[in-house]
Image (cartoon, helix red, strand yellow):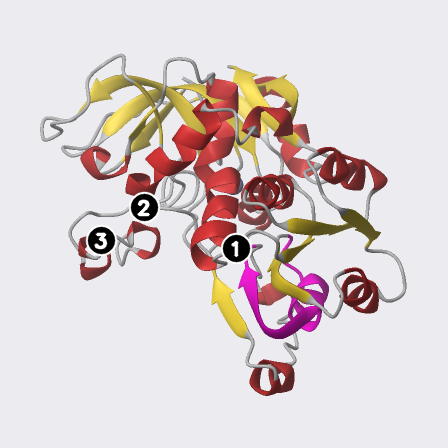
C-alpha cells in the first residue's frame, strides 16, 4: 500500500510503498476513504508523543470501508462503512467496563500506538468495541472529522462541560476542534465568544454563529471576554493547547465556571501556570476531555444526520495523499480543516 512515512521526528514526510497490514484476531483492516489532518498528528511528528516508534505512519481521523476481518470479530463484515474514535478501548479493563473507553488502561490509537491512516489501509484493534457504523448518506470526508476533533469538541462541550442554553461559552483557539466546539455550543443554545489569532479562523467562527469574536493578539483577551460576557463565561475551553490559552481560559471564567482542557499540552513545550488561587476562591471546575467512546456516537450522528450539526462545513480543503506531508507540516496555517480524500 501507499503510505506517508517519517523515519525521524520533524524529519522528511515521504509517500512510499510499504507492506499491507493484516487484521489481528479481534481487529479489522479498513480501506481509508478519508482522513483528516490534525494538530495531534503534528505533535506526533514533532516527537511529543511517547507511544510512537519509528519509522511511523501518522493519521487518526479516518473513515472508510472494512477490507479484512479478524477471526474473532462478530459485528463487522467486509464492505461495512465505518469510523472510529481516535482512542480505541480494549473492551476488557475496568474503565471500559464502566463505559469510559476514552480513558482505557490499554488503549490503542491509530497513528500513535501503531501505524495510522495516512495510507490506503489501516489496522484497527478491538473492532467489536470501537467501530462506529456510518449512516449511508454521510460522506467519508465529513465522517473523518468526527473521529477526533468533532467528537472531542462534542464531549468537551456537552458531556464534560455540561453546557446549558443561554450560557456564555468562551472558545480559545479556533482550529478544527475549536470551530467544532463553536458549532456544538451554538447548537446547544449557548452564546459563544470565539478567540483566535487569525482573521480567517475568526471569520469562520462568526459564520458558525459565535456572538462575539476576539482577536487573541490583542493586549487583554481575558478582560475583553469578561466584559463581553457580563462578568465571565460559565464554560470556557482551551481548544488549542498552549500555556497562554490554558491560562486565559481559566482566567476568563465567572465564579463556579467550568474550564475544559481540550488541546494537548506536551510538557516539552512548557507547563501552564494555572491560577489555582482563582480555582479555589471562585470554586472553578477544571476538567479534561480526551475523545469520546464509540457507544456515545449515535447521539452525535443523529444530530449530524438531522442537520443540527454541520461538520461538513469545517472541511475547507480536500487533498491527495501526496499533499499530506505539506499539509501536516503546515497544520494551523490555513483556517478550517484539511482532509485527505484520494490515496
Ligand atoms: Zn485529531
Ligand atoms: Zn480498556
Left-right relation of 313 to 333? left
Residue 230: quarter of image? bottom right
Q: Earlier in the sequence, mark 3 or mark 2?
A: 3
* Residue nearest the viewer, comparing 49 with 187: 187
* Residue nearest the viewer, comparing 235 with 217: 235
Q: Earlier in the sequence, mark 3 or mark 1?
A: 3
Measuring 82% from the left and 52% from the top, which residue is drawn there? 214
The residue where tag 1 is placed is: 163
Measuring 55% from the left and 67% from the top, which residue is drawn there? 258
Over which residues does the magenta segment extend? Answer: 240-262
* Residue nearest the viewer, comparing 243 with 59: 243
Left-right relation of 87 to 3? left
Instruction: Farthest residue to the front: give it.
Output: 166
Q: Look at the numbered discs 1 and 2 and tell me whether their residues touch, using CB distance below 8 Å.
A: no
The reply to whether the residue tagged 3 has its Cβ within 8 angstroms of ligand 2 is yes
Residue 286 image offset from top left, x and y in percent: 52, 71
Q: Rounded to the nearest whole Å, what is the CA distance between mark 1 and mark 2?
A: 29 Å
Instruction: Farthest residue to the right: give it.
Output: 219
Residue 245 image offset from top left, x and y in percent: 70, 62
Q: Earlier in the sequence, mark 1 or mark 2?
A: 2
The quadrant of the picture occupied by the N terminus is top left
Amino acid at each position: 500500500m501507499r503510505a506517508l512515512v517519517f523515519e525521524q521526528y520533524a524529519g522528511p514526510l515521504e509517500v512510499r510503498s510499504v507492506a499491507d497490514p493484516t487484521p489481528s484476531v479481534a481487529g479489522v483492516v479498513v480501506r481509508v476513504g478519508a482522513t483528516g489532518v490534525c494538530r495531534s498528528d503534528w505533535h506526533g511528528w514533532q516527537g511529543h508523543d511517547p507511544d510512537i516508534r519509528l519509522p511511523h505512519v501518522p493519521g487518526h481521523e479516518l473513515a472508510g470501508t472494512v477490507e479484512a476481518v479478524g477471526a474473532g470479530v462478530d459485528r463487522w463484515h467486509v464492505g461495512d462503512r465505518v469510523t472510529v474514535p481516535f482512542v480505541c478501548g480494549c473492551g476488557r479493563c475496568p474503565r471500559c467496563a464502566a463505559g469510559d473507553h476514552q480513558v482505557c488502561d490499554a488503549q490503542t490509537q491509530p497513528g500513535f500506538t501503531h501505524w495510522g491512516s495516512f495510507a490506503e489501509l489501516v489496522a484497527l484493534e478491538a473492532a467489536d468495541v470501537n467501530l462506529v457504523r456510518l449512516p449511508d448518506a454521510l460522506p467519508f470526508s465529513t465522517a473523518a472529522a468526527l473521529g477526533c476533533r468533532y467528537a472531542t469538541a462534542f464531549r468537551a462541550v456537552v458531556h464534560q462541560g455540561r453546557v446549558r442554553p443561554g450560557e456564555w461559552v468562551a472558545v480559545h483557539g479556533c482550529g478544527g476542534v475549536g470551530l467544532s466546539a463553536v458549532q456544538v455550543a451554538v447548537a446547544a443554545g449557548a452564546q459563544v465568544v470565539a478567540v483566535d489569532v487569525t482573521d480567517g479562523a475568526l471569520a469562520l467562527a462568526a459564520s458558525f454563529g459565535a456572538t462575539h469574536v476576539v482577536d487573541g493578539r490583542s493586549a487583554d483577551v481575558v478582560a475583553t471576554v469578561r466584559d463581553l460576557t457580563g462578568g465571565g463565561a460559565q464554560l470556557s475551553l482551551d481548544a488549542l493547547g498552549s500555556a497562554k490559552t490554558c491560562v486565559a481560559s481559566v482566567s476568563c471564567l465567572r465564579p463556579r465556571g467550568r474550564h475544559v482542557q481540550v488541546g494537548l499540552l506536551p510538557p516539552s513545550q512548557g507547563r501552564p501556570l494555572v491560577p489555582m488561587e482563582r480555582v479555589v476562591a471562585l470554586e472553578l471546575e477544571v476538567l479534561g476531555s480526551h475523545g469520546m467512546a464509540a457507544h456515545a456516537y449515535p447521539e452525535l450522528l443523529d444530530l449530524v444526520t438531522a442537520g443540527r450539526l454541520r461538520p461538513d462545513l469545517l472541511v475547507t480543503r480536500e487533498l491527495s495523499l501526496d499533499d499530506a506531508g505539506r499539509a501536516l507540516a503546515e497544520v494551523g496555517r490555513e483556517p478550517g480543516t484539511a482532509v485527505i480524500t484520494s490515496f
